[in-house]
Image: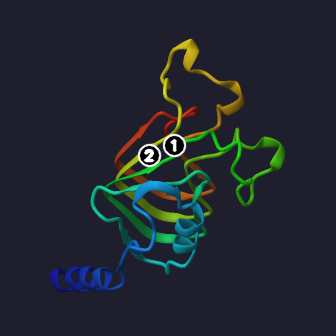
Amino acid sequence: KCLAILVCFLICIETTAQVILPRSIDGTGKTDVSDEMNSFFDSLPEGSRVVFPKGKTFRVEGILRIRNKKDLVIDGNGSSIIAETTGKDVPVAVGKPKHNWPRSREHLLVENSTGISIVDLIVRGPHKTGGVSEKAYVKELEAQHGISIYNSRNITVDSVKITHVFGDCIY
């Protein structure tokens, strides 16, 4: 029994490819890196472990999309994904209806995926007075969730801080 468990454990370790987020993606938070981040995530093979550089800030004014992925770990390494605007002047994200933009801008979207883990990440939206008070509610932007999960299974969100969003932290 012990040998069988050890073999399975070794196989699982070998199939996880660790990928460092490319340095070419601006980690200062000064420029919108939505397109670069989405191209990077789209290119990842099954079973990848993405490691963000420690403590960086990535400005994503569109939607960071994790779509059609299997067995992916996103290790934020204490980094932040931030939005500085409501998204009204940002082109409509792929797959989103134009009439519902920017209301439906999620900051991070997991869709049609299984076995996704998101750990040690900060997601900060643009809502400076967000919270649970009556003044915090903005109907036109109520679906700007921190993380949205659609048609997906076995999703883990651990040690993730979500702040200043107009919608739910996790939907």
The residue carrying mark 2 is: 123
Color encoding of the figure: rainbow
Q: Which mark is residue 117?
A: none
Question: Is residue 171 in view from this perspective?
Answer: no
Mark found first going from the N terminus, 2 or 1: 2
**Which of 18/123 is in front?**
123
Q: Secondary structure at mark 1?
A: loop
Q: Is residue 66 above or below residue 164?
A: below
- Residue 101 drawn at (x, y percent): 75, 44
Which amino acid type corresponds to the residue marked 1 in the rendered image? Gly
**Which of 17/36 is in front?**
36
Which quadrant is the C terminus positioned in?
top right
Residue density around tag 2, few if under 14, some if 14–19, many if 20 or more, within 10 Å: many
**Which of 44/101 is in front?**
101
Residues tagged 2 and 1 counted as in contact (Cβ below 8 A): yes
The residue carrying mark 1 is: 146
- Residue 106 drawn at (x, y percent): 60, 46
Q: Secondary structure at mark 2?
A: strand
Residue at the spot 70% in from the left edge and 42% down from the top edge:
88
Label 2 to label 1: alpha-carbon separation: 6 Å
- Residue 37 drawn at (x, y percent): 52, 66
Which quadrant is the N terminus positioned in?
bottom left
Which amino acid type corresponds to the residue marked 2 in the rendered image? Val
In this view, the residue farthest toward the front is: 30
Residue density around tag 1, few if under 14, some if 14–19, many if 20 or more, within 10 Å: many
Left or right, 51 with respect to 6, comes to right
Left or right, 118 with respect to 127, comes to left
**Which of 83/103 is in front?**
83
Question: Is residue 75 in view from this perspective?
Answer: yes
Residue at the spot 38% in from the left edge and 73% down from the top edge:
23
